Image (spheres, helix red, strand yellow):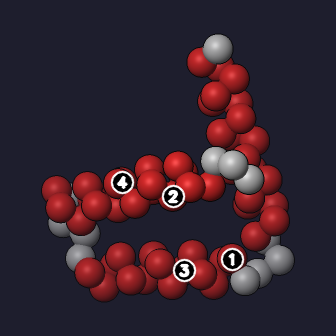
Amino acid sequence: MTVSIPLVVILAAIAFVAWRYMGLRVWQAILCILLGFFVAATTAAPEIRQLVTAIVQWLTSAKT
């Protein structure tokens, strides 16, 4: 999936903004990271990846 690195950068930027300006606590960020790892290990991970890929493709095709 070629959009994984830019999407990770965007999500990291959103997390930084939430931490810096919205009062996201460190324990909440750690909880979100752990949740991501645990969801990635489930059988729902391929469906989530396909959904994110479809949304990103739809957004990028809407621009052109």
In space, the residues marked 3 and 4 are separated at their CA atoms by: 17 Å
- Percent across and percent down for residue 37 are 60, 81
Question: Is residue 1 found left or right of 35 in the rendered image?
Answer: right
Identity of the residue drawn at 81% across and 65% down = 46
Amino acid at dot 1: Ala
Of marks 4 and 2, the one in the foreground? 2
Q: Which mark is residue 40?
A: 1
At label 3, the amino acid type is Leu
**Between marks 2 and 1 in the image, the one whose residue lies nearer the viewer:** 2
**Number of residue marks:** 4
| Badge 3 vs badge 4, beta-carbon distance below 8 Å | no
Q: Which residue is mark 4?
A: 14
* Image position, residue 27 (x, y; %): 31, 85
The CA span between labels 4 and 1 is 20 Å
Q: Earlier in the sequence, mark 4 or mark 2?
A: 2
Q: Is residue 48 left or right of residue 3?
A: right
Query: What numbered label is drawn on residue 8?
Result: 2
Q: What amino acid is found at the position of numbered circle 2 in the picture?
A: Val
Disc 3: which residue = 35
Q: Real-space Cα distance between discs 3 and 1?
A: 8 Å
Question: Are discs 2 and 1 less than 8 Å apart at CB?
Answer: no
Dividing the picture into quarters, in which one does residue 44 lie? bottom right
